[in-house]
Every structure is written in structure tokens, then in C-alpha cells.
């Protein structure tokens, strides 16, 4: 297992959370997600991401919104919204993971779960966000 597996599980948690309205922390406790991450280190990483994203969801959405040129957050496909929230949380709050790694992982998720337009859209949003973060001295 790997952090990629943990991220994929968190993506699924965020997707389910968005659909059901349950918090990511609650969704994480479901047996499916516990079984999907048999390695303790992966489970711990996923738990940290799910809790962090759940606790900063409003901040993440507020950060994301200006980069959605001609889009509204609620009109995004649920898959794209989940991927973007995960990547933005990592970029802003998980310092041991380089931003480029977070973006690459987001693009891999987009290839697997999004449609043909998801990858370029997500890449554009995250690249713009990363430029802003760098300009503000955060990366």
C-alpha cells in the first residue's frame, strides 16, 4: 500500500461525504474504508487527511472559488470537487508533501475517476493556486 492508496480512499470518502452530507470523519469510520487501508500508516495518513479536510471544508471552498473561472463550486462534478479539495488541503496544510506531488496525485485521480476534461481543468486550477501560494511566500 502507499499514500496513493490513502489518497484514493480519501477521495472516495470526500465523494461519499458530498453525496450523503455526512462528515468525512464519519464516512472514514465505515468498515469499507478501514478494510481498504490494511496498512496502519496508510490508515493514519487517510484519517489525518479526512479529519483535516472535514475541519477546513469552508476554508478550502473559499480558497478554491476564485480559481473556478466561469464555474460555480456546486456545479462542478462531485469527482472534480473532491479531487480539488483533497489537493488544495495537501498544498496548504501538509507541508511534508511537496505541492507538485499533490498536483500529480490529483491528476492521477482525475484520469481514473473524472471525465476527459477533468485533468486539464484540475491542473489549471491547481497550477493557478500554486502560483498564488508561491507569490505569497507559502511554498
Image (spheres, grey):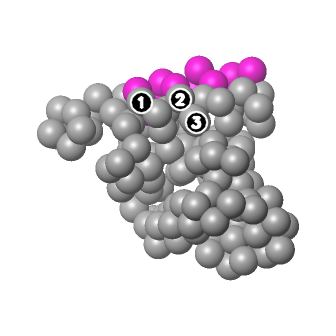
Whether pointer 2 and pointer 1 mark residues with C-beta atoms closer than 8 Å, the reply is yes
Which of marks 3 and 1 precedes in the sequence?
A: 1
Q: Which element carries disc 3, helix, strand or loop?
A: helix
Q: In percent of the image, x 18 and y 32: which residue is there?
A: 135
Q: In percent of the image, x 37 and y 29: which residue is there?
A: 128
Where on the picture, by quarter, is residue 77? top right
Cα separation, mark 1 vs mark 3, equals 10 Å
Whether pointer 3 and pointer 2 mark residues with C-beta atoms closer than 8 Å, the reply is yes
Cα separation, mark 3 vs mark 2, equals 5 Å
Q: Position of residue 123 (x, y in %)?
A: 52, 26
**Other-residue count near label 2 (Cα within 10 Å), few / some / many at <14 / 14–19 / ≥20:** few
Apparent side of residue 25 relative to residue 64 in the rendered image (left or right): right
Stretch in magenta? 116-127
Q: In percent of the image, x 65 and y 30: which residue is there?
A: 108
Q: Position of residue 42 (x, y in %)?
A: 62, 58
Which residue is denoted by mark 3 in the rendering?
Answer: 106
Q: In percent of the image, x 68 and y 60: which residue is there?
A: 39
Using the rendered image of the protein, determine whether residue 72 is visible from the camera's viewpoint: no
Apparent side of residue 76 relative to residue 94 in the rendered image (left or right): right
Whether pointer 1 and pointer 3 mark residues with C-beta atoms closer than 8 Å, the reply is no
In this figure, what is the number of numbered marks? 3
Asked whether residue 126 is drawn in magenta, I would say yes
Which residue is denoted by mark 1 in the rendering?
Answer: 100
Residue 104's disc number? 2
Q: Position of residue 71 (x, y in %)?
A: 56, 37
Q: Which element carries disc 1, helix, strand or loop?
A: helix
Amino acid at each position: 500500500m502507499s499514500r496513493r492508496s490513502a489518497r484514493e480512499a480519501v477521495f472516495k470518502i470526500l465523494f461519499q461525504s458530498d453525496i450523503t452530507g455526512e462528515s468525512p470523519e464519519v464516512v472514514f469510520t465505515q468498515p469499507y474504508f478501514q478494510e481498504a487501508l490494511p496498512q496502519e500508516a496508510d490508515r493514519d495518513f487517510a484519517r489525518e487527511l479526512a479529519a483535516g479536510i472535514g475541519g477546513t471544508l469552508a476554508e478550502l471552498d473559499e480558497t478554491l472559488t476564485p480559481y473556478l473561472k466561469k464555474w460555480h463550486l456546486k456545479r462542478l462534478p462531485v469527482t472534480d470537487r473532491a479531487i480539488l479539495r483533497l489537493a488544495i488541503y495537501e498544498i496548504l496544510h501538509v507541508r511534508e508533501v511537496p505541492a507538485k506531488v499533490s498536483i500529480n496525485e490529483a491528476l492521477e485521480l482525475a484520469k481514473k475517476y473524472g471525465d476527459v476534461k477533468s485533468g486539464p481543468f484540475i491542473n489549471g486550477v491547481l497550477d493557478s493556486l500554486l502560483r498564488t501560494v508561491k507569490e505569497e511566500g507559502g511554498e
